[in-house]
């Protein structure tokens, strides 16, 4: 079932389903984990539900639990693979009105000027864009961590 055109989240899910999203890390029970287009913090990921829903409260029971479990599981994998101190999680949906979770690995060695800043205060224009050459190895390590190997 194609959802093309509704939101960027719908379009990203369609690309993941079709095997066409270059930053797709893994299919999880509730959806897809991808590395974000702009790596404002190294390892920044998005969790996209499949099927796409408007917001977390649109999910009920087991579907809601699967999404939240996948979010935590992806965070566990990010901690293991990146050596991050913690993961910052965010769900908004104000710009793209479809459920998606932001996962930001935070490291102890971040420059002091950004250590306590929320990610939207960072310079997104200066953030490296996802490329397979620069981020493919991280994507593979995350996929292996999620697969349990």
Image (spheres, grey):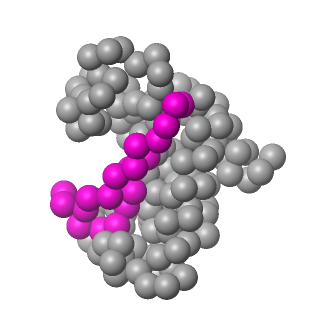
Q: Is residue 96 left or right of residue 51?
A: left
- Based on the displayed image, in which of its 4 quarters is residue 51 positioned? bottom left
Percent x, y for residue 22?
52, 45
Q: What's the magenta region?
A: 84-103
Percent x, y for residue 91?
32, 58
| Residue at left offset 50%, top offset 50% | 34
Q: Is residue 74 visible?
A: yes
| Residue 141 painted magenta | no
Which residue is most to the right? 149
Seen from the viewer's position, the closer of residues 100 and 21 is 100
Q: What predominant SS class does the magenta segment belong to? A: loop
Instruction: Please say if 20 is above or below 144.
Output: below
Seen from the viewer's position, the closer of residues 70 and 4 is 70
| Residue at left offset 50%, top offset 68% | 67
Percent x, y for residue 126?
27, 22
| Residue at left offset 55%, top offset 72% | 66
Seen from the viewer's position, the closer of residues 6 and 115 is 115
Q: Is residue 25 left or right of residue 14?
A: right
């Amino acid at each position: 079932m194609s959802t093309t055109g509704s939101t960027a989240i719908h379009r990203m899910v369609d690309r993941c389903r079709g095997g066409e999203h270059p930053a797709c890390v893994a299919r999880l029970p509730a959806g897809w984990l991808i590395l974000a287009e702009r790596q404002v913090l190294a390892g920044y990921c998005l969790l996209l539900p499949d099927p796409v829903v408007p917001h977390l409260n649109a999910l009920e029971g087991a579907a809601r639990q699967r999404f939240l479990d996948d979010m935590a599981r992806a965070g566990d994998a990010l901690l293991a693979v990146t050596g991050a101190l913690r993961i910052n999680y965010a769900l908004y949906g104000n710009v793209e009105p479809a459920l998606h979770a932001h996962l930001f690995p935070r490291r102890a060695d971040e420059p002091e000027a950004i250590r306590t800043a929320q990610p939207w205060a960072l310079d997104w224009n200066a953030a490296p864009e996802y490329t397979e050459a620069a981020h493919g190895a991280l994507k593979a390590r995350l996929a292996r961590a999620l697969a349990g190997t």
